[in-house]
Image (spheres, rainbow, N blue to C red):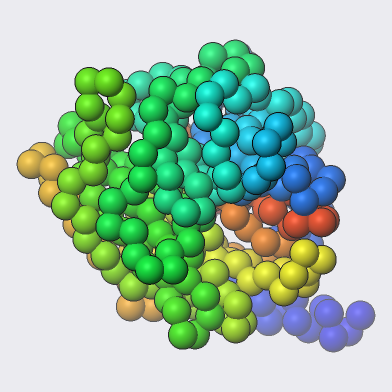
C-alpha cells in the first residue's frame, strides 16, 4: 500500500495520475465483440445532462454488431444497437460526424476503407464507400477525424505504428464530397509521430485522434500485450492543425508531445472532444475484458 501511495504521489507531480483510480470508468461491453474502437459525438439529450455518441466495433464476421449508440452520463451509461444497412465492413476502427451534415458520418476500417453513413433513429445506411488515398505499405488505421475551419473541410488519419521501429504516420488532406456522396481527398501530407507514453515494444503510437475547436490535435496511444492484457494507454497533446480559406491543411506536431493523462490497465481506442465542453470522452477496447468509457477535461483551448 505504501508503494502504491508513493507511485500515485509521483504521478500527481508529473500531472499524469492514472485515470480509473477514482472509479469513474463505466463498463459498456462485456467481451471482445463489444469494445469501443471509435467514438463520434451525436448530440445532447433534451435536458443536456447526457450525450449521445456512436460507437464502432471492430468485428469481422457477417452479422456481428458494427455500430451502437451510447448515452453517456456521469453516473451511468446506456447502450443500444444500431442496425447496419448496406455492405458490411470488416474491422471498423473509427467514426466521425461530418460537420454541417446532420446525421451523416464517415467510418473507417483498419485497412483504409471509408464508409459514408446516414444514421436515422436506430439504422445506419451506407451511402457510399471508397479507399483512403496514399495508403502506405503495412498501414493499419485506428483513427480518423474531420476538421472544419474557414469554410473548408479537412481529414486527418493515421497508421497506428508499432513500437520503436515504426512510428505512427499522421496523414492530412483537404476533403470534399462528390454529388453522389463519395468523399474526395485532396493532396495528402504525412508526418511521423512517436508517443511519449506508453513505450512498450508493441505501442500503437496513435490509436485515435480528436481536434479541439482551436485546432489542438489530441491523440490516444495504447499498448496491447494480448487479448487478456495487460493494457496501457495515454492521451496526449500532439500539436495543431489549421485549414486556410483556400483549403490548405497545415499540421504542426510537437517535438515532445504533452502527456495529458496515463491509463494503466486500459486500452484506449476512442477519444472524442465534446462540442461546447472542455471534456473528452474516452473509450476502450479491452478485448476479452470488454469496453469502458469515461470523460476527462483534455479539450480546453
- The count of marks equals 0
From where the camera sits, is residue 187 visible? yes
Q: Quadrant of residue 19 in the image?
A: bottom right
Q: Quadrant of residue 49 in the image?
A: top right
- Describe residue 192's horizontal placement relative to residue 41 as left or right: left
Q: Residue at x 41, y 23 (%)?
A: 127
Q: Position of residue 190 (x, y in %)?
A: 26, 65
Q: Position of residue 265 (x, y in %)?
A: 76, 67
Q: Is residue 44 above or below residue 291?
A: above
Comparing 155 with 5, the one in front is 155
Q: Position of residue 165 (x, y in %)?
A: 46, 85
Q: Residue at x 22, y 60 (%)?
A: 189
Q: Is residue 50 above or below residue 285?
A: above
Q: Residue at x 34, y 59 (%)?
A: 135
From where the camera sits, is residue 236 visible? no
- Describe residue 123's horizontal placement relative to residue 246 as left or right: right
Amino acid at each position: 500500500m505504501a508503494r502504491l501511495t508513493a507511485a500515485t504521489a509521483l504521478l500527481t507531480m508529473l500531472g499524469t495520475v492514472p485515470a480509473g483510480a477514482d472509479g469513474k470508468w463505466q463498463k459498456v461491453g462485456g467481451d471482445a465483440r463489444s469494445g469501443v474502437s471509435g467514438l463520434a459525438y451525436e448530440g445532447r439529450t433534451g435536458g443536456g445532462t447526457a450525450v449521445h455518441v456512436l460507437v464502432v466495433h471492430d468485428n469481422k464476421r457477417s452479422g456481428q454488431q458494427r455500430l451502437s449508440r451510447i448515452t453517456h452520463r456521469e453516473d451511468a451509461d446506456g447502450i443500444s444497437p444500431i442496425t447496419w444497412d448496406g455492405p458490411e465492413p470488416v474491422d471498423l476502427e473509427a467514426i466521425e460526424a461530418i460537420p454541417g451534415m446532420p446525421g451523416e458520418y464517415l467510418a473507417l476500417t483498419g485497412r483504409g476503407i471509408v464508409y459514408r453513413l446516414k444514421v436515422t433513429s436506430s439504422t445506419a445506411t451506407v451511402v457510399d464507400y471508397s479507399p483512403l488515398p496514399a495508403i502506405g505499405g503495412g498501414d493499419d488505421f485506428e483513427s480518423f477525424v474531420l476538421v472544419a475551419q474557414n469554410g473548408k473541410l479537412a481529414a486527418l488519419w493515421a497508421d497506428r505504428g508499432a513500437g520503436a521501429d515504426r512510428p505512427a504516420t499522421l496523414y492530412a488532406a483537404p476533403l470534399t464530397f462528390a454529388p453522389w456522396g463519395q468523399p474526395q481527398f485532396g493532396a495528402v501530407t504525412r508526418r511521423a509521430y512517436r508517443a511519449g507514453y506508453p513505450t512498450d515494444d508493441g505501442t500503437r503510437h496513435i490509436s485515435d485522434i480528436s481536434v479541439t475547436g482551436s485546432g489542438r490535435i489530441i491523440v490516444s496511444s495504447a499498448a496491447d500485450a494480448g487479448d487478456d492484457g495487460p493494457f496501457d494507454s495515454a492521451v496526449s497533446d500532439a500539436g495543431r492543425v489549421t485549414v486556410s480559406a483556400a483549403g490548405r491543411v497545415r499540421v504542426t506536431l510537437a517535438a515532445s508531445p504533452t502527456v495529458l493523462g496515463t491509463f494503466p490497465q486500459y486500452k484506449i481506442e476512442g477519444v472524442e472532444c465534446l462540442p461546447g465542453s472542455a471534456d473528452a470522452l474516452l473509450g476502450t477496447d479491452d478485448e476479452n475484458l470488454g469496453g469502458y468509457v469515461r470523460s476527462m477535461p483534455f479539450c480546453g483551448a
